[in-house]
Structures are given as C-alpha cells and as structure tokens.
Image: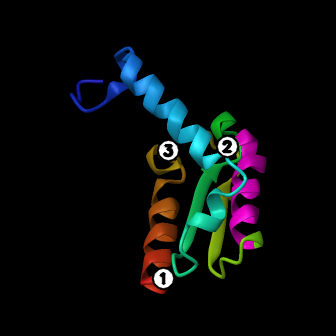
Amino acid sequence: MADPYNAGMRPFSAGFAAGFADLYERIDSPDWAARIPRTTSVLFVSGDQDPVGSFGSGVYQAANRLADAGHPDVTTRLWTGVRHEVHNQPEVRDEVFATIVDFYDRAL
C-alpha cells in the first residue's frame, strides 16, 4: 500500500468510473472479437476463483468469442483455487510468469 501507483486504497474518480464503464461496454459487445486483428495472438490468464472473470466461465467465454471470430491463436490458462491478479499470488507467481514468457516466446 506504500506504492504510490497502487490505487487499492484510494477512491475511484468519476472519470475513472466512466472510462471503465465505457471500456466494459465496448469489450462486452457482441462484435468486439471481430475487431481484433486475426494476426494477434491472445493469452488469457486468470484464477478460477476470480469473480471478475466469472470464476473462469467469463474467461472461457471471451476466449471462445475470439475463436468463433476466426482467431487461430487463443490460449487460456486458469489456476485452480486462485482469485484475482494471479501474477501477484505467491503460490503460483513463478508458474504464471513462466506461462507468459513461454507464450511470448512462441507468439513473437
């Protein structure tokens, strides 16, 4: 919490809330997946206990929308028993970073 860039203890501004709502509306629209270039490789990482990703089902739904829109390279990795910010969870942090590095090595 001492990190000045960590907004975890500060209230959200109205502008942030409005921007977040606008972004959510755009990415939740039925045609968002078709707007992403098919040459873009996509990796989803999440915990299966994260309510933001609907406990995994929302993550798979987003991945499936990309696949259904014709994206050939969509990878999804969920960690069992982990909630939000999997990259900050000590019990899986090393595995998460290894997964991301492996993805980048393959995709780039």
Q: Please name the residue shown 23% across and 30% down the image.
A: 3
Estimate how packed mark 3 is, as few (under 14), some (14 to 19) or many (20 or more) residues with alpha carbons within 10 Å. Answer: some
Estimate how packed mark 2 is, as few (under 14), some (14 to 19) or many (20 or more) residues with alpha carbons within 10 Å. Answer: some
Asked if residue 12 shows in the view, the reply is: no
Residue 66: percent from left, percent from top: 68, 67
In the rendered structure, which amino acid carries the disc numbered 1? Ala
Residue 58: percent from left, percent from top: 73, 47
Q: Which residue in the protein does label 2 denote?
A: 53
In the rendered structure, which amino acid carries the disc numbered 2? Gly
Residue 94: percent from left, percent from top: 46, 60
- Determine whether the residue tagged by mark 3 lies in a helix, strand or loop: loop
Reply above or below: 53 against 45.
above
Estimate how packed mark 1 is, as few (under 14), some (14 to 19) or many (20 or more) residues with alpha carbons within 10 Å. Answer: few
Tell me the distance, in whole angstroms, between the alpha carbons under discs 3 and 1. 25 Å
In the rendered structure, which amino acid carries the disc numbered 3? Gln
> Would you say the magenta stretch is mainly helix, strand or loop?
helix
Question: Which range of residues does the magenta coloring cover?
Answer: 54-67
Q: Please name the residue shown 56% across and 69% down the image.
A: 42
- Determine whether the residue tagged by mark 2 lies in a helix, strand or loop: helix
Q: Which residue in the protein does label 1 denote?
A: 107
Q: Please name the residue shown 48% across and 33% down the image.
A: 20
Q: Is residue 34 left or right of residue 6?
A: right
